[in-house]
Image (tube, rainbow, N blue to C red):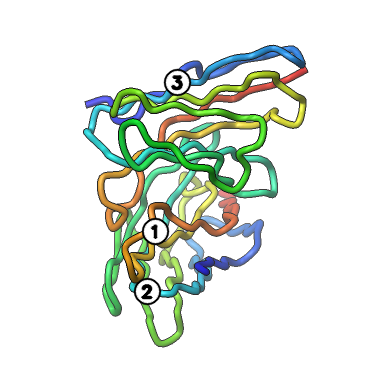
């Protein structure tokens, strides 16, 4: 079956530090990959996505590259801000064979805290 | 364009009481989902629907029922609330999974 494994948190960084949150996946078909962000007290928002191998998703200074050879989709940002403090979820949708997969598979989330 | 709207945003129930959580989307999405989020547990799928009039069980369906009588609405019911159902509940919808989900802002439910 499908699964997503992301690094356990919490992750604590100082402002302007470099961020990497690792995400690896297992899928039976041809997944699309996503990063969602959840700010305190809010719902999840789509941060970025990639739909095929070697695609790079980017938004708000965050980037992630779909690596089929390593089944990974690591989230990176060159210089984090206090306002980036949130929980980050990696997820996949697997079109698979037969087209019977109707839901996303999520990782457990990684809490990021950025200190001034 | 409101997206996905959940009502209510907060609720406190006594054990044994019943309630219905409403999710409404105005994006003409076929797929709708109910998740619960608990500390350290990530998101767990309760029920989902792939179209009007259809529902299916997710990972943790016990104690919940759902209905999708209209395409834009997905209702989650608790017939007899238990303290173990204290959680934050999120609704989501999708047109194509390749585009991901749109989430609502959540309902924080406390059962005492």
Relative placement, left or right, of B26 versus A27 is left
Q: Residue at x 50, y 47 (%)?
A: A82
The numbered mark 3 sits on a residue in which chain? B
Relative placement, left or right, of A113 versus A59 is right
Outermost residue, bottom side: A69
Spatial separation of the CA atoms under disc 2 and disc 3: 34 Å
- Contact, CB < 8 Å: mark 1 with mark 2? yes
Spatial separation of the CA atoms under disc 1 and disc 3: 25 Å
Which secondary structure lies at badge 1?
Answer: loop
* Mark seen at residue A29: 2
Residue B31 vertical position relative to residue B79 in the rendered view, above or below: below
Coordinates of residue A84 in the picture (x, y in percent): 47, 49
Q: Residues within 10 Å of mark 1 (few under 14, many from 20)?
A: few
Identify the image quadrant of the C terminus of chain B. Answer: top right
Residue hosting label 3: B22
Residue hosting label 1: A101
Which secondary structure lies at badge 3?
Answer: strand
- Contact, CB < 8 Å: mark 1 with mark 3? no
* Front-most of residues A78 and A44: A44
Q: Residues within 10 Å of mark 3 (few under 14, many from 20)?
A: some
Spatial separation of the CA atoms under disc 1 and disc 2: 10 Å
Q: Residue at x 53, y 66 (%)?
A: A4
């Amino acid at each position: 079956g499908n699964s997503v494994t992301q690094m356990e948190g919490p992750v604590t960084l100082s402002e302007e530090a470099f961020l990497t949150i690792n995400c690896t996946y297992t899928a039976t078909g041809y997944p699309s990959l996503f990063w969602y962000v959840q700010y305190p007290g809010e719902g999840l928002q789509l941060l970025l996505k990639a739909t095929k191998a070697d695609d790079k998703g980017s938004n708000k200074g965050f980037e992630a590259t779909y690596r089929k050879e390593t089944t990974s989709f690591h989230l990176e940002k060159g210089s984090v801000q206090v306002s980036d403090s949130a929980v980050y979820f990696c997820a996949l949708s697997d079109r698979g064979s037969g087209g019977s997969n109707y839901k996303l598979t999520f990782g457990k989330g990684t809490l990021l805290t950025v200190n001034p | 364009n409101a997206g996905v709207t959940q009502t209510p945003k907060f609720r406190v129930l006594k054990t044994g009481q019943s309630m219905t959580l409403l999710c409404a989307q105005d994006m003409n999405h076929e797929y709708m989902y109910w998740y619960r989020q608990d500390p350290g547990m990530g998101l767990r799928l309760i029920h989902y629907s792939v179209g009007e009039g259809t529902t299916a069980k997710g990972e943790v369906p016990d104690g919940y029922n759902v209905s999708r009588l209209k395409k834009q609405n997905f209702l989650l019911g608790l017939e007899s609330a238990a303290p173990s159902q204290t959680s934050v509940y999120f609704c989501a919808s999708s047109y194509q999974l390749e585009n991901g989900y749109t989430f609502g802002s959540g309902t924080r439910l406390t059962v005492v």
